[in-house]
Structures are given as C-alpha cells and as structure tokens.
Image: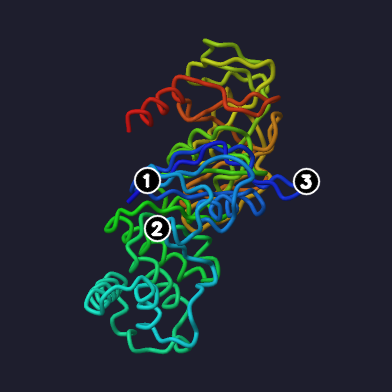
Amino acid sequence: MAEIIINQLHKSFADFVAVRNSSLKLEDGKFVVLLGPSGCGKTTTLRMIAGLEYPTSGQITLDGKDVTYLRPRERDIAMVFQLFALYPHMGVRENLAFPLKNEGLPKAEIDRRINEVAAILRIEHLMNSRLSSLAGGDRQRLALGRAIVRQPKAFLMDEPLGTLDAEFRELMCIELRKLHERLKTTTVFVTHDQNEAMALADHIVVMNQGDILQADSPEGVYNFPSCVFVAQFIGRPPMNLLPLSQGVQAGVREVKLGGVSVAIPLTIGHANSALLGIRPEHVMLTNDPQAIQGKISQVEYFGSHWIVVVDTESGLIRAMVPKTNRPNEGDVVGVQFKTERTVLFDAVSQQLLASETTQAHQRSMNHG
C-alpha cells in the first residue's frame, strides 16, 4: 500500500496541454477514480503515474519516493488496461505466473500466490483453460489477477470495464469494490462513466481540459459540485441550473427566482449574478399557488420514477416524480425545492458559492 502525491504535474504535446499544473494527494489504501470526458487528461495523468509518459514538469512521489522519471518496472505498480493486455499464446495459469517468473520468485511462492488470487477472483475452474476459450468477463478477471498476483504498492486501471457489456460491467463493479475492501491496495481507476465512478470510488477526481476541477467523495461531487461543469457532468439527468433575478450577498437566506422567493442555506459568498442549482430528486411538484408556476412540457418513464420537465418563467426545471404519481403533459403545476439541497454558483466564474451546508461538508471531509 502507498500514498501517491502529484505536485504541479504538467504535460504538453507541442502546443497541446494535456494536463495543466495539477496537484493531488491519493491517500494510502483508497480507491480513487479519475473521471471526465474524453480528452480531459485523466489517462495521461494515469500514464505519468505509471511511468508510461514522463511529465513536462512537476513531481510524482510513491510511498514517499520520487518516481517522476523512473521506468515503470522501478515503481512497484501494476496496471490493468482496457484491452486486457494478456498473452494469447499462454493459458490462464501461465498468464498469472509470467510476471512472477520474471521477478525470479521460487516455484512454491508462485504457486501459492496463483492459488490465492484464483480463489479471490473465483477462477479456480479456469486455471487449465486456454485464453481463446474465455468470455470477456473471465478475461477481465484474469487481467486483474495478473495485476493482483504481483502484490504491488498500487493498482492503476485504465477504463478496464470499457469493452464489457452492461451486465458484465455492473457485475465487475461489484467484484472490484469487494476486491478492494479485501486487499486495501491504493487504486487509481480511470473512467468517463459516472455510474462506475459512483459505485467504486472512495474519492472522485473530476477533470476537464487538463484541469482538476474537484477532488472529493462521491457524495461531495454530487451534492456540492465545485463548478457548473461538474454540476452538469455528474447526475442523470443533470442538476437544474436556474438564473436568479438578481445577485446574492453574503448572509442571505432566500433569493428571487422568477418573482418567487426561494429559501436557501445561509450564504457565505456573494456574486453580482448567480445561478441556483438543485438536483431533480429534490424538486417537488405542488398545487400551491405561491410556488413557482409552470406547464409540464415533457414526461419520461424510467421504471422506478418519472422525469418531468416543467417549463417556467425561469427556464426548464426537471423533477423526479415517484412512479405512482403519473404526471401529464400540459398540466399546470407549482414547483418547490428542498431548501437544504439548493446550491448557488457565480454566473460569471461558474464556481460554487460558499454556504453553511458547503462549509459543513468541507469540515466533515477535513475530519474524515
């Protein structure tokens, strides 16, 4: 197990900046997910931690040791790729044994580790199989097994579930999380899939255009997104973002939205123009004439709930409605928000404004 620290890490390819002066501490024994859209810099960051790319500038330490310019084999890490990177001419047992033979371990130790990993991943029945006979999910287990068998200080995983179908992906998320709880090895996992990130991570690092936008718990990036991009990237459907009728000042407890007063947590920050953010599941439809009024313009059925789009004076507002309360397009309804679940963003900088709830979350993270 090992703590990984990157300090002012920067990587450019000619005029293109892939990672921009990023600093981050990946705690010992945690499962950390690098999340963002294609081209955001997450895979480049992972490859620099692995030693497959060298940074233009900055520093990487692993377990207190500067590894910035060390070769991959000198870093004591194991990497799992999207396309498995297995040896097709070898069987299952031979694939597992290969990295251990390269380390010069005695046969008894190799057999012990292989048997232990096979039991953990529940692939004992496949040990004498050829690679060509394995299904996609079994190949992924084998790729994980070849990383685990080395007992490295850290696991690095580059979208390892990307080629699996939805059913296998969900199963492997569960298995990966169980595996991490058992091994407690520092793990850095790259994905663009927010569902994978939410299911797996102790901490999520959201990236875009080479920048780290937020490093927080899954609850933190969902409930207190650091900026408008994170608010819209995380969540399906994304957070509602509604322009306020006026700016906000520190100390206010309510704002005007389309002429209606909306209660908010005590505001610490201030902005000349602001956006109110609220998740669809914290929006309630009501018959109260004092609520924000609008007409239902769209209804989508999701099995366990309805997603309702209400067209209001302040813009479109999405609400998540229980499946037992079927709404109808064209109905005029009122819209209310759960006060403690609202957040505010500066409309110019697009950054989250501090409030009593965001500060309470930050205190809990610092003490966690």
Residue drawn at the location 59% of the way across and 11% of the way down: 249
- Bin the neighbour count of mark 3 within 10 Å (Cα to Cα): few under 14, some 14-19, many 20 and up: few
Kindly identify which residue carries mark 1: 63
Disc 3 residue type (three-letter): Asp
User: Which residue shows up at 24% across the image and 74% down it?
Assistant: 109
**Please, is residue 118 above or below residue 351 in the view?**
below
Marker disc for residue 15 = 3
Q: How is the image coloured?
A: rainbow
- Quarter-of-image position of residue 113: bottom left
Which element type, helix, strand or loop, lies under badge 2?
loop
Residue under the point 47% across and 66% down: 169
Q: Say which element carries label 3.
A: loop
User: Crowdedness of circle 2 by 10 Å Cα count: few (<14), some, many (20+)?
Assistant: some
Q: Nearer the viewer, residue 257 or 249?
A: 249
Q: CA distance from mark 3 to mark 1?
A: 33 Å
Q: Which residue is mark 2?
A: 76
The C terminus - image quarter: top left
Left or right, residue 182 beside residue 56? left
Mark 2 vs mark 1, CA separation in Å: 10 Å
Residue 220: where, in percent of width, then height?
45, 36
From the viewer's side, name the closer residue of 216 and 50.
50
Amino acid type assigned to the residue bearing label 1 in the image: Asp
Amino acid bearing label 2: Asp
Say whether disc 2 or disc 1 marks the residue closer to the N-terminus: 1
Sequence-wise, the earlier of marks 3 and 1 is 3
Residue 193's tag is: none
Across and down, in percent, residue 353 comes to 56, 22
